[in-house]
Image (cartoon, helix red, strand yellow):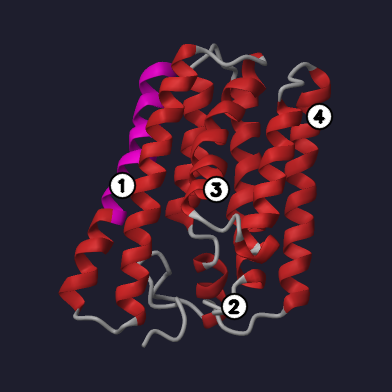
Amino acid sequence: MQRDRLSEWFVPKFGSRNFRLSIGILFLPYTGMVISFAVWGSFSVEFSLDRLASICLLYFFAVGISAHCLDALGSKKKPWGNISHTKLWLATIISLTLSFSIGVYYAFLDSWLLFPIGITEGFFLLAYNLELFHGRFHNNTSFIISWGILPVFAGAVIQSNSISVETIVFSALSGFASYVLITISQKYKELKRQNANYEMYYKKEIILKIVSSAVIFGTIFFFVIIYL
């Protein structure tokens, strides 16, 4: 049975245990997908590079650091072992402060629709990852809404304070990609927990790699095409 997640494909195979854990807990392929979804939102309207960079940083702090630190705190299975709760809370508070500072700045500047999006994201951030309300919101629907659909809306709103038809289309695509990711990821983790045959969970791992790589590198490709 898998004791922790240091053997995962997205965790570096080099460096000290603390280094590998620090990178692994960020779930960089999945974080990269969420950031890509926010970029899709910006692509759906007329965008500026400074706001594009801001929404990417916002979601890196909110998801890459805060959400995953809270997940380590809230999970009963302790997937990353016994990490200092003080360090996890410190990282969460600092990254959330940075994330919300970016959002509040643009919300007061000219993108007031970020307020309802930010409040909703903040709720799911805590309820999903800390498994509040007896884990009622720790489910696939919450995952798809919070880290699949809403980032697209936020990406559009920070640029134009509006949601276009293209934004809705992109959100549908991101929601579907998130659904595929979370369902395959659950099957993959269950197989690893059961110490299943390598070939069985490796097929799931390949799908996860393909989905995350397609989203991330596809986003980079379209950015280069659009911007140049």
In the image, is residue 80 part of the stretch drawn in magenta?
Answer: no
Find numbered disc 2 in the image and state the secondary structure of the residue it sits on: loop
Give how far apart the Cα atoms at labels 1 and 3 are: 20 Å
Looking at the picture, does residue 199 appear above or below residue 167?
A: below
Find numbered disc 3 in the image and state the secondary structure of the residue it sits on: helix
Give how far apart the Cα atoms at labels 2 and 4 are: 36 Å
Find numbered disc 1 in the image and state the secondary structure of the residue it sits on: helix
Q: Which range is magenta?
A: 208-227
**Upstream in sequence: badge 3 or badge 2:** 2
Residue 209: percent from left, percent from top: 30, 54
Q: Which residue is mark 2?
A: 76
Q: Which residue is mark 4?
A: 105
**Upstream in sequence: badge 2 or badge 4:** 2
Residue 210: percent from left, percent from top: 26, 49
Tell me if 228 is positioned left or right of 202 in this view.
Answer: right
| Residue 212 visible in the displayed image | no
| Residue 127 visible in the displayed image | yes
Q: Amino acid under label 1?
A: Val
Farthest left residue in view: 199
Give how far apart the Cα atoms at labels 3 and 2 are: 19 Å
Magenta segment, prevailing SS (helix, strand or loop)? helix
Looking at the picture, does residue 1 appear above or below residue 218?
A: below
Residue 47: percent from left, percent from top: 56, 16
Give the residue drawn at x 52%, y 82%: 17
Q: Amino acid under label 4?
A: Tyr
Q: Which residue is mark 3?
A: 142
Give how far apart the Cα atoms at labels 4 and 1 are: 33 Å
